[in-house]
Image (cartoon, helix red, strand yellow):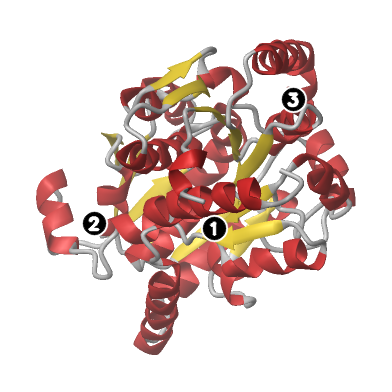
Amino acid sequence: MSEAVYQLKKIAIIAGESSGDILGAGLIEKLKEKYPWLKVEGIGGPLMQANGCQSLYPMERLSVMGIVPILKRLPELLKMRKQLAKRWKKSPPDLFIGIDAPEFNIGLAKKLKAVEIKTIHYVSPSVWAWRPKRIVKIKKAVDLMLCLFPFEQAIYQKHAIDNFCVGHPLADQIPLESDQVKARQKLNLAQDRRYICVMPGSRGSELKFLSDDFLKATKLINQFYPDIGFIAPMANKVRREQFEKAIAEQTDLPKIELIDGQSREAMAASDLILMASGTATLEAMLIKRPMVVAYKVGALSYKIFKQLLVIDTFAIPNLLSGETLVPEAIQHECTPDALFGEIRAWLEAEPERWQETKAIFTDWHKKLRKNADQYAADSIIHWYSQQNLKPDA
């Protein structure tokens, strides 16, 4: 039978934050190259909308981090999910694709799968990291899992859940060699000075818990290394204002040059990065810059979270390699003194440590470079066709 019989006409898709918006936009673009008439609706940011996604709610309403903030917003989120389920049960899409945001998307996928809508989840929930029993719920809700990293596939294969490892779009976008000279020219930075890039996060909650520690660490660095400059890319206007307020509350800080956006250029221009845990640690790895990674949430959130953890590392380079390539300061370990100590260790390290780390980063960059947007679209199209060829489909 011809694949044309199984052409996609309508998909529902939901992304919960900017990283998901990037993935969703790339996926929609490639699917529309195959199916130009494809109708796309759900929740997405500006990039997904620019590629033709009708966003039924503002994406920002899903951007919640930490157990306590999620609980505060739970009634709103549950109502939103109920309304979406009702809409798509009444007018079913060919596929539902949840991009990350597992607390929201997996529950919605379960409701839709119950009425025989095919469900896909893009970006594996970190079941290998915490709450591993979630795999039972995922199996009931998700027909196909698209993983970004190869180590994630084992758990889905073990539980007989269809899956593909599509690589990571960032590995496709970022060159194997990032040009520090050009990045500094673009940002009007001195070529003959060392710079540390300060990245306290893109979420309000991250800046709330990390800004003071990061700023006090820059003060210590400046005392020992007065020649080092500091740059800090800000995700948006709101985060900039939040960080400026934190700066105003400190005294005797070194000059920190705030940059609107351009985080990738800022990382490429730097010699070392002090950063919040998250996808940005993958970007830093792909740009081949050494880093010190911090993770901190509210005390109650962390107390609950820690009980559910099965790993003791958060930085993506460490998760990929299975070793401590980059130092991490987690929760109570995240203090100005500890951050300074790890930064100083990098600054005083022998060249061999830098070279060896860069070589490992480069190796992983090549492994993750799979033309992810195209790979994800092709995987979905192939899998969807196979589902329709099954006797019970």
* Residue that numbered label 2 is attached to: 269
Question: Which of 86 and 100 lies nearest the eye of the viewer?
Answer: 86
Q: Is residue 169 visible?
A: no
First of labels 3, 2 by sequence position: 3
| Gap in angstroms between the C-alphas marked 3 and 1 | 25 Å
The answer to whether residue 264 is above or below residue 103 is below
| Gap in angstroms between the C-alphas marked 2 and 1 | 27 Å
First of labels 3, 1 by sequence position: 3
| Gap in angstroms between the C-alphas marked 3 and 2 | 36 Å
Q: Is residue 290 visible?
A: yes
Residue located at (72% from left, 12% from top): 86
Residue located at (25% from left, 50% from top): 265
SS category of the residue bearing label 2: helix
Residue 153, horizontal then vertical, whole percent: 67, 65
The answer to whether the residue labelled 2 contacts the one labelled 1, judged by CB atoms less than 8 Å apart, is no
The kind of residue on which mark 1 rests is: Leu
Question: Which of 171 and 33 lies nearest the eye of the viewer?
Answer: 33
The answer to whether residue 20 is above or below residue 130 is above
Q: Residues within 10 Å of mark 2 (few under 14, many from 20)?
A: many
* Residue that numbered label 1 is attached to: 148
Residue 350, horizontal then vertical, whole percent: 39, 86
The kind of residue on which mark 3 rests is: Ile
Q: Residue furthest front?
A: 1
* Residue that numbered label 3 is attached to: 70
Q: Residues within 10 Å of mark 1 (few under 14, many from 20)?
A: many
